[in-house]
Amino acid sequence: MKKQKVSVIGSVVTVEYPTISKTVSIDVTKLPEQVRMDGLLHGIKQKLGDAESGKSPTEKYSMAQRIVENMLAGEWELTATRDDSGIIIEAIAVIKKLKIAQVEASLSEMDDDEKATKLKEWRAHPKVKAAIAKIRADRAAAAAKDSDDDDISLD
């Protein structure tokens, strides 16, 4: 079963339903102001709420910060390099059998350049790469287990 396709051209949002050959379109400029505001707030709430879904609270917070900074700079889409420091820190904590706060504390003593260098060094280490892969796999397995969606379409 094909999923619906949503597109935005100018101020018109269109949803196509391929399986029934139907479309729904709306020009958002024709909506009452309160409905537009509600939609705007819902979209921003959704964007922030979906930030790094399935990741650690540190990663979610970091992504939400990036999203807010990006929107304040006038950009809706993120184009900058992804901040993966949260999962790197988590991997180091797992490997060294420390609390995440302890790893974060060790980094907080460094200036920004030292911290960036240390994170880059850790990111390249094979044990850190393996720990990150395991963390992500565990999260994906947990998300799949919690999923109510048993319908996996091949088309």
Image (spheres, rainbow, N blue to C red):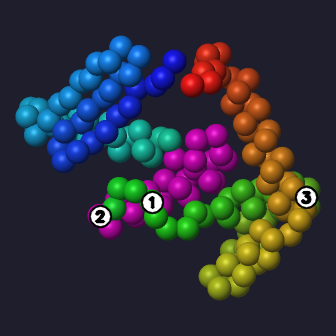
Residue designated by label 3? 95
Distance between the Cα atoms at labels 1 and 3? Answer: 31 Å
Q: Quadrant of the C terminus?
A: top right
| Residue 81 seen in the figure | yes
Main SS, magenta region, reads helix
Q: Residue at x 52, y 47 (%)?
A: 51
Whether residue 66 is in magenta: the answer is: yes
Q: Is residue 83 left or right of residue 50?
A: right
Name the kind of residue labelled 2 in the image.
Answer: Gly
**Residue labelled with disc 2:** 74
Q: Residue 21 falls in which quadrant of the image?
A: top left
Residue 127 figure quarter: bottom right
Give 72 or 102, whichever is nearer the viewer: 72
Query: Can residue 99 be seen here?
Result: no
Horizontal relation, residue 82 to residue 47: left or right = right
| Label located before the other in sequence (3 or 2) | 2
Amino acid found under the numbered disc labelled 3: Ile
Give the label on residue 78, or none.
Answer: 1
Residue 95: x %, y % from top left: 90, 58
Whole-percent x and y of residue 17?
Answer: 36, 21
Part of the protein shown in magenta: 51-74
Image: 19 above or below 44: above
Pointer 3 and pointer 2: residues touching (CB < 8 Å)? no
Q: Check disc 3: other Cα within 10 Å, few if <14, some if 14-19, many if 20+.
A: few
Q: Is residue 35 left or right of residue 106?
A: left
Taking 87 as reference, is 11 left or right?
left
Residues under labels 1 and 2: Cα distance?
11 Å
Query: Tag 1, which secondary structure?
Result: loop
Rendered view: 45 above or below 143: below
Q: Amino acid at mark 1?
A: Leu
Q: CA distance from mark 3 to mark 2?
A: 40 Å
Q: Give x and y (percent) for residue 98.
A: 87, 58
